[in-house]
Image: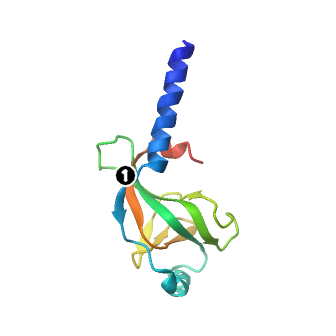
Amino acid sequence: MPQDTDSNIQKQLDSLSKLLNEPGEPVNYGCPICDLEKMISRCREIDNTKAYCVVQRWMLWDVGCHEDSIQDTLLIVYSNDIYKDEASRIPPGGWVRSSPILDINDQCIFSTRNTHYILLGKGTRKRALVGDVAKLL
C-alpha cells in the first residue's frame, strides 16, 4: 500500500513540474515595458475599481477537466515574476495564479473579477488540468 501512495505522489509531482517548468506554445500577448503607463491608464478606463498586477515571465493556461478536450475550458494567468502589484498583495518577484479570466482588453490586459493582469513581454500558452491548477493555491 505505501508503494501505491508513493507512486501516486510522484505522478502528482511530475504533473505539477510539467505544468510549471515545461515550455508551452510561445505567444506574444504582452506589451513592451515602454507601454506600461499607457496600459495602467487603460485599466482605469476599463474598470477603476479593480487593482492592476503587472506580470512578466507569464503563462496562459487553458484549464479543463480532460487533457484532450477544448470544451468547457477556463483561461488562467500564471506568473512566477511579479513586476508590480498595485494592491501590494504580492511582492515584486513573487508568483501568482489568477482566478478565471473574464475579459481581455488591448491584447495584454487580462481581467478577473477583482484584478487586471497586465502581461509584459512574451509568454507561453498551454493546456492544464483543473486538478493540477487547483493544487497551486
Outermost front residue: 22
Q: Is residue 85 above or below residue 7?
A: below
As rendered, which of 65 and 7 lies closer to the eye? 7
Task: Identify which residue is drawn at 69% across, 65% down.
Answer: 91
Q: Which residue is mark 1?
A: 73
Q: Is residue 43 above or below residue 19?
A: below
Q: Residues within 10 Å of mark 1 (few under 14, many from 20)?
A: some
Q: Secondary structure at mark 1?
A: loop
Task: Identify which residue is drawn at 53% across, 80% down.
Answer: 43
**What amino acid is found at the position of numbered circle 1 in the picture?**
Thr
Task: Identify which residue is drawn at 30% across, 49% down.
Answer: 71
Q: Position of residue 120 (x, y in %)?
A: 49, 73
Residue 107 relative to residue 137: left or right? left
Q: How are the residues colored?
A: rainbow
Q: Is residue 106 above or below residue 65?
A: below
> Across the whole image, how many numbered discs are drawn on residues?
1
Q: Position of residue 132 (x, y in %)?
A: 48, 42
Q: Write down the quadrant of residue 122 in the picture.
A: bottom left
As rendered, which of 36 and 86 lies closer to the eye? 36
As rendered, which of 113 and 86 lies closer to the eye? 86
Q: Position of residue 101 (x, y in %)?
A: 46, 62
Q: Position of residue 57 (x, y in %)?
A: 50, 64
Quarter of the image with the N terminus in it: top right
Residue 33 relative to residue 69: left or right? right
